[in-house]
Amino acid sequence: MTEAHPKKSARKTGMQISPWVILGSTAILIVVVIVLAIQKANREQRHMSEILSAKGAVLIRAVEAGTRTGMMGMSWGGAQIQRLLEETGRLPDVRYMAVVDPDGKAVAHSDPEMIGKPFDQGRKLLHLGSDLQENWELVDLGEEGRVFEVHRPFRPMLAGRGPGSTRMYGMMRRHGTVPPQNDDWFSASDQKQLLIVAGLDVEPFEAAIREDLNTTLVLSVVLVLLGFAGFVSLFWMYSYRATKRSLQDASAFADKVVASLPVGLIATDQQGRITFFNAAAERITGLKREETGGQPADMLLPSTLCGLKELLDSGQTIAEQEMECRFISGRTVPVSVSAARIVNELDAYVGQILILRDLGEVRRLQDEVRRQEKLAALGGLAAGVAHEIRNPLSSIKGLATFFSGQFEAGSEGREAAEVMVQEVDRLNRVITELLSFARPSDIKRRRIDIAPIVTRAVGLIQQDAANQRVQVELKMDDGLCPVLIDPDRMAQCLLNLLINAIEAMVDGGQLTVRCERVDPGEVRVAISDTGQGMAPDEMAKIFDPYYTTKSQGTGLGLAIVHKIVEAHGARLNVESAPGRGTTFLLHLPCADEDRTAQGGRRDE
C-alpha cells in the first residue's frame, strides 16, 4: 500500500512538459516556417519569370507582326524595324529591344548608339528549342541592375507562316516592294540566323518580391513568437497544474495530519478571528467547528486566552503550561496550553496558534495510580490486621456466649452478653469483607451471554426494592454480543450496584437497568436511580475503601465492585448530580471468537 504513492506521484510528474520539448517544438516550428518562406520565394520567382517571359514573347511577336504589316503595304527595311524597336523600347518596364546577328553584334537596337556594337560586351546568345519558342535568362548588368531577357530567332516573314510566306516574300522582292539584297542588314536576313531580344526591367517585380518576403518574414517571426509563446504558456499551464495539484496534495496531507492530532489546535488571524479549529479542539472545548470559523477568539475561548494573552502580545512563547480553563460551553477542563505568535519571513505578525492538551485522562490515571497504591498498602495492612483480630474475636464470642448462659433471660447481664455477641459478629463480617478486598481477585472468565446474569441479579433484588417502594424497570436490547467474564464475580458486582442504588432511594423511586450495545465491540449495563445524587467531591471518593455515607455501611462495597471490574478489563463510570440521581455505567468488551479466558475455559 505504501509503495503505491511514489509511483502515483511519478506518473503525475511525467505528465509535465519538459523544457527540451518546448525547445524542440520551437525549432521544428522555425524549420517549418523557413521551408514555407523559401517555397513562397521560389513560387514568387517562378511567377515573375512566367509573367516576364510572357510579356517578352508578346513584345517580340508584336515587333514581328508590325514588320509583316509594314512589308505588306510599303517598302520596308532595317530603318523601319529600327524605328519600331525604338518605339517599343519606350514602353514601360522595357529596358531595350534589339536584333542580334550570329556574330553577337546588334544590327538593330532601341538605343541607336548600340547599333553595330557587340551586344552586351560580346555575350553570345544561344537559342535552345524550336524557332517559335522563346528562351529567357536573368542577366546581371552590374551597376545598371538586372534585366530579364527574352529572345528567339527573328522571323518577320516566316514566323508561323510556313512555305506560303516565303513565296510571298519572293513576289514582293520581284515587284520592288522589298529593298535589294545589299540595301541593309534586313535585306540579307534570310541568309543569316538573327535573334530578337527583349530586355525587361525586373526591379518592380523584385521590389514586390522583397516586400512580400519582408511581409513573410514578419509574419514568420510573429508566428514563431506566437508558437513559442503558446508552447511556453502550455508549459506554464502544466507546471501550474502540477504545482497546484502538488500544493493541494500537500495541503490535504497537512490538513489530515493536523485534523488527526490528539491535541487541540486553534489558529487565529491578525484580527484575532479563528481560522482553524480541529476535531480535538472540538472535544476539549465543547464547541463546534462550524460555529467557530471566522468568529473572534475572545468571544468563544476563555477570557484573555486562559490568562495567556498578555504574554503572547509581548512576544513570549508558552510551552506546556497547565491550568484549568472554563469555556463558553460551561465546561471546566484541565488542560496543558502551548501558544505562540505566528510571523512570516518579513517578521510581520500574521496570527496566533494555541495548542490544548486535555489533562483530564492524565489526571484520572494519576488518581487511579495513587488510589491503587493506597489500596495496595491498605490491602496488605488489612490482611495482617484481619488475621491477628479474627482469633481473639472467636475467643471473645465464645466467652460472651458462655456468660450469656449464666444469666437469666431478660436480665441486664444477659442482654449485655448478647450485645457483645452481635458486635463480634458485625466485626467479623467487616473483617471478612476486608479480607475479600485485600485478597487478589480470582477471576475465572468465560465466553457467556450477559443478559441472563443481569436478569437474575434484577430478580434477586425485587423483594428488597418492593420493601423500599422502589419500582424496577429492566430494558434489554436485542443482539447483544457475548462477553468474557466470570459469571459469579460479575453477578456479585451487579448485586452490589443494585443494592447500593436501592439504598440511595430512602423514600422510594425508580430503578432502571438497561443493557445495550453502544459500540460494535462493547456492551454497556446502565444502572440508574432517582436518589439524591452526589456532589463532585463525593464522586471522587466513592471507590475509596471505608468511604460511605450510610450509617450501617462498611465503605467496602463499591471498592470491591471497582476491583472486580478492573480485574475483568472493563470500565465503570459514574454520572451524578445533586437532586438528579446517579447512574453507574458498566462497559464490558465483547468476547472474540478465538479468545480464551485467562485461567478459565472456552464456552463451547
Image (cartoon, rainbow, N blue to C red):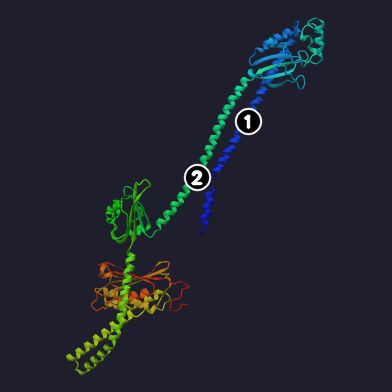
Q: Are marks 2 and 1 in contact (CB under 8 Å)?
A: no
For residue 38, the mark is 1
Q: Is residue 332 above or below residue 22?
A: below
Q: Is residue 208 above or below residue 36?
A: above
Is residue 551 something that shows in the picture? Answer: yes
Q: Quick one: SS at disc 2?
A: helix
Residue 280 at x, y percent in the picture: 37, 59
Q: Quadrant location of residue 163?
A: top right
On screen, residue 177 versus residue 554, left or right, reads right
- Residue farthest along the top direction in this orientation: 176
Q: CA distance from mark 2 to mark 1?
A: 36 Å
Q: Amino acid at mark 2?
A: Ser
Q: Residue at x 49, y 47 (%)?
A: 242
Q: Earlier in the sequence, mark 2 or mark 1?
A: 1
Amino acid type, mark 1: Ile
Residue 454 at what x, y percent from top left?
37, 75
**Which of the 4 image quadrants contains residue 425?**
bottom left
- Kindly identify which residue carries mark 2: 239
Residue shown at 41%/54% (left/top)?
255
